[in-house]
Image (cartoon, rainbow, N blue to C red):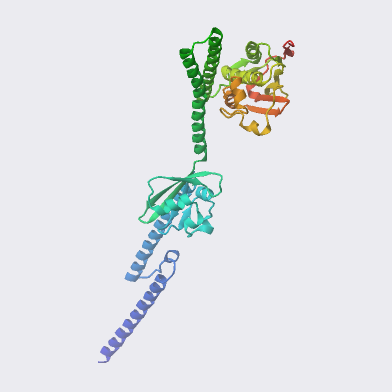
């Protein structure tokens, strides 16, 4: 009886100790599972099944955290990539609240990600075209409108995703719009320039067909028809020259042209076309060679000389001069004593078909493309076209070419070719 009692007491004590130990282990595991960041604190090392459970939970949590970190890194990488996109990107929720925006879109719409987050986008971007498009629910086509800053034209496309979310893509189309407008204006100008002489020619043909004309009248009509034909031929020639220049490869830097020989040809052409109406003077201060396309350089220099002769009244003077400056750059300068040009016209002189005086330009046979050709040629040869003019005193046109396109094989004396005074 005594032995049985002792055994019972021992068993009870052992069971109590085991229960207390199990309770402490459970409390340790419970405290660990109650921790806010399980992965930051390792699971307690416990013997038995509770320890195994803790270790498995610990491994599962760490694996989940690793996957979450990997997904977060991928998301960050994705957002960084679209943040660098040249197009603007906005993410909107179901109520059109701004959830995310990249730097390009922030610039397009004048928004700030931190300040404007969770704001309704139609309260931030109030362009009527954009608001109407977003609220219409019809997103088949893009909508265009000026940016809130007013310095750009935007094209915006909306794409639904994720059921109720919206992706807004914006693109700055200012350059494209300007190019399209220039193309439309160019086509309209060409059509007008060609239609005018064709109308005149058509009228003259009807006159020759329907009216009995004297010899003198017939000769006058034929002379006017020849002038209109020459005008159309010059226009087509300049258009073809401009198209050829724009479509040609970049001028080579290893092909050299003698400036003196080229200017001698220009002088002969100038005197032949001018027929001693002006005092024409050519100065070549030094022998030099230019690298590039000879036909283009000739066209640019000739257009400057012919323009000066065309717009300078008879009896005036035109001076063309070539020189190599101290820094090695080359300069071709054309100076005239013509009527001059008001300052507000100078920035637009190189636009196609731009004329300061349209009636005078047509009277003198100008096509409105000469200075556009000069500008393209000079830019293709890395140079600069500079224009100075004083109304009533004349104009100076200068083509400055960089030193790497100019070389002087040997020093030569100054060579002047004055035109005898009429």
Which of 328/344 is in front? Answer: 344
Tell which residue pokes out farthest to the top in this image: 215
Q: How far across and how far down the image is residue 318, in percent?
A: 70, 18
Q: How far across and how far down the image is residue 340, in percent?
A: 69, 26
Tell which residue pokes out farthest to the bottom in this image: 1
Taking the image as shown, residue 296 lies to the left or right of residue 160, namely right
Which of 46/137 is in front? Answer: 137
Residue 125, compared with residue 23, is above or below; it is above
Taking the image as shown, residue 263 lies to the left or right of residue 198, namely right
Of the 4 image quadrants, the one containing the C terminus is top right
Residue 181, compared with residue 218, is above or below; it is below
Q: How many marks?
A: 0
Residue at (49, 15) in percent of width and height: 207
Taking the image as shown, residue 56 lies to the left or right of residue 118, namely left
Residue 84, compared with residue 337, is above or below; it is below
Quadrant for residue 338, please give it: top right
Of the 4 image quadrants, the one containing the N terminus is bottom left
Which of 224/319 is in front? Answer: 224
Residue 212 visible in the snapshot: yes
Residue 378 visible in the snapshot: no
Residue 222, compared with residue 165, is above or below; it is above
Q: How far across and how far down the image is residue 331, in percent?
A: 68, 22
């Amino acid at each position: 009886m005594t032995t049985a009692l002792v055994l019972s007491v021992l068993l009870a004590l052992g069971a109590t100790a085991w229960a207390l130990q199990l309770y402490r282990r459970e409390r340790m595991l419970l405290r660990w599972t109650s921790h806010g960041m399980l992965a930051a604190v390792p699971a307690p090392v416990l013997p038995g099944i509770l320890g195994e459970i803790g270790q498995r939970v610990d491994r599962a949590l760490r694996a989940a955290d690793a996957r979450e970190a990997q997904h977060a890194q991928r998301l960050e990488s994705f957002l960084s990539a679209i943040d660098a996109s040249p197009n603007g990107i906005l993410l909107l929720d179901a109520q059109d609240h701004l959830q995310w925006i990249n730097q390009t879109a922030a610039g397009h719409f004048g928004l700030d990600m931190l300040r404007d987050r969770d704001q309704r986008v139609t309260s931030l971007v109030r362009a009527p075209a954009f608001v109407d498009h977003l609220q219409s629910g019809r997103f088949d086509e893009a909508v265009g409108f000026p940016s809130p800053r007013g310095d750009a034209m935007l094209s915006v496309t909306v794409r639904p995703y994720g059921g109720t979310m919206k992706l807004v893509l914006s693109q700055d189309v200012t350059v494209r719009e300007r190019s399209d407008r220039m193309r439309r204006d160019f086509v309209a100008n060409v059509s007008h320039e060609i239609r005018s002489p064709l109308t005149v020619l058509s009228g003259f043909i009807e006159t020759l067909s329907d009216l009995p004309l004297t010899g003198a009248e017939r000769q006058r009509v034929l002379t006017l028809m020849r002038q209109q034909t020459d005008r159309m031929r010059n226009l087509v020639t300049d258009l073809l020259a401009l198209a050829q220049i724009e479509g040609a490869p970049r001028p080579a830097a290893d092909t050299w042209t003698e400036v003196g020989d080229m200017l001698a040809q220009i002088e002969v052409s100038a005197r032949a076309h001018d027929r001693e109406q002006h005092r024409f003077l050519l100065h070549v201060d030094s022998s030099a060679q230019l690298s590039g396309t000879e036909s283009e350089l000739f066209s640019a220099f000739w257009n400057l000389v012919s323009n000066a002769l065309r717009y300078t009244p008879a009896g005036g003077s035109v001076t063309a001069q070539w020189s190599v400056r101290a820094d090695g750059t080359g300069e071709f300068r054309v100076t005239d004593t013509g009527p001059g040009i008001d300052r507000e016209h100078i920035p637009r002189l190189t636009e196609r078909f731009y004329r300061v005086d349209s009636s005078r330009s047509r009277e003198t046979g100008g096509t409105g493309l000469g200075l556009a050709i000069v500008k393209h040629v000079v830019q293709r040869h890395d140079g600069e076209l500079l224009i100075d003019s004083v109304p009533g005193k004349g104009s100076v046109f200068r083509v400055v070419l960089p030193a790497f396109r100019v070389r002087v094989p040997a020093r030569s004396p100054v060579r002047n070719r004055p035109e005898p005074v009429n």
